[in-house]
Image (cartoon, grey):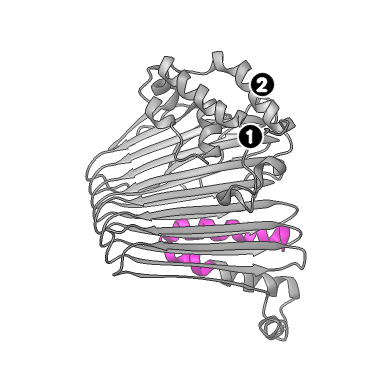
Amino acid sequence: MNVQIQPPRTPAEAALIDAFGERLSLLPGNGEVTLKRDAAIEAIKFGLPTRRIESWHYTDLRRLLTAVPAFDAAAAATPVAPLIEGSSVLALLNGTAGKAAGIEGVTVSSVSEKLGDGTYAPALGPQDADDAIGALNSAFVADGWLLNIADGTVLEKPIELQNVQAGGQVHARFAVKVGAGVTATIVERQTGTGSALVSSVDNVVVGEGSNITWVIVQEQPDTATHLGQFNAWIGKDAKLTLFIMNTGGKLVRQEIRVVTKGQGSDFQLRGVNLLAGDTHTDVTMVLDHAVPHTGSREIVRNVVTDKANGVFQGRINVHQIAQKTDARMACNTLLLSDEGEFSTKPELEIFADDVQCGHGATVTEIDRNHLFYLMARGIDEKTARGLLVRAFVAEVIEELEDEPLVDALEALLVDWFQTHG
């Protein structure tokens, strides 16, 4: 008989379990929600994921999460200026929803409200057996925003969802149900100033014929751990473009889980990871092509300097029924330091026989010939390196074809390089 002995809990695991006991009575929710929370903390009691779990192989959370800050009731976060002027801002300040802005065609409510009456309980279940982020968030989430976008709505200005922390623990939810024939841009800001543990889960349902652009800008300080999860289900003839930019955070794990639910659906992922210092950033994607005649393109660009460590895991599952799938994935990394590292693991699992699928990955340094060319024309080395890095990344940003959005993201790129280049 094999007997499995659970190793002693780490300080982080013990802190999370103790915090749950202290917080449970303060969290919103009826009996059904409490049962979901209890089930979620049981997963944490079993232990945070280690490299023995395949999907966490490059991010040993049990080892990397060395400490967990306490909840800070006195933390006073304030909204940040929107990425694009004129955006409708819905702010979550240290885990508490502020006043809801009125947006034509959009019904807005708070997660705390839906937890209180129990209607949000079904959304608290884990995505799979290894869903550590979902479990952590389900155990502690207290608030967030729920949006219902009516059929045919065309939003001229973006909606900006802000999750701003000022220290302690923050656990947020954003849920968006998009009707049929909707055109909208949603910007999600994950930012703050404190020493924090932040978990954030997005659930997005895209209705038939809609065209949605969702931008996640993660710019936490190097004192914060950020654990994010983006879940999406794409309907018939709908298109979802997800753009992710990581520019901060000490320990970051951003999961992407997408299912093409309707024929003619299309998923586009563009990612930019700007990694510096002694940080660890992991972007892990699982994409299910579940019906015929669907498409996807994933392009991730990474810039690594100092002692930063980065990861991109991309898994595309093509179901047996999903004939005529067209799926392509590429990950390109620029190393600016001999001490930086980046691990890439692209995967294709194909059960259909009439598909077009492919993946590729490259790792390179700045081309010395290109650098010499610029410096020979009077450009100093730092500026020349910055131009080359910007060209490497800007190609992906410019695919958004939204001038104010492109300008805002390129400004973040310039700011990052001025600090870390």
Q: Amino acid at mark 2?
A: Asp
Does the magenta portion include 395?
yes
**Residue at x 65%, y 26% (from the top left corner):** 75
Relative vertical location of residue 357 with respect to residue 255 in this rendering, above or below: below
Q: How many marks?
A: 2
Few, some or many residues within 10 Å of mark 2 (<14, 14–19, 20+) = few
Which mark is drawn over residue 18?
2
Q: Nearer the viewer, residue 111 or 390?
A: 111
**Measured along the vertical axis of the image, is residue 421 above or below residue 209?**
below
Where, quadrant-wise, is the N terminus in this rendering? top right
398 displayed left or right of 223? left
Q: Position of residue 391 (x, y in %)?
A: 57, 72
At a point 46% along the width and 20% down the height, the residue shown is 35
Which label was assigned to residue 57?
Answer: none
Which contiguous range is marked in magenta? Answer: 394-421
What is the x, y in percent for residue 220? 63, 44
Callout 1 secondary element:
loop
**Is residue 160 found inside the magenta-colored segment of the image?**
no
**Looking at the magenta stretch, what is its main secondary structure?**
helix
| Residue 361 can be seen, yes or no | yes
In this view, the residue in front, 126 or 78, is 126
* Above/below status of 402 relative to 353: above
Percent position of residue 99, x then y: 45, 26
Q: Is residue 392 above or below residue 349?
A: below
Asked if one can make out residue 84 in the rendered structure from this viewpoint, the answer is: no
Give 103 or 18, whichever is nearer the viewer.
18
- The CA span between labels 1 and 2 is 14 Å
Q: Nearer the viewer, residue 27 or 404?
A: 27
Q: Quadrant of residue 356?
A: bottom left
State the residue position of label 1.
Answer: 47
Query: Which residue appears at 50% of the width and 29% of the height?
Result: 138
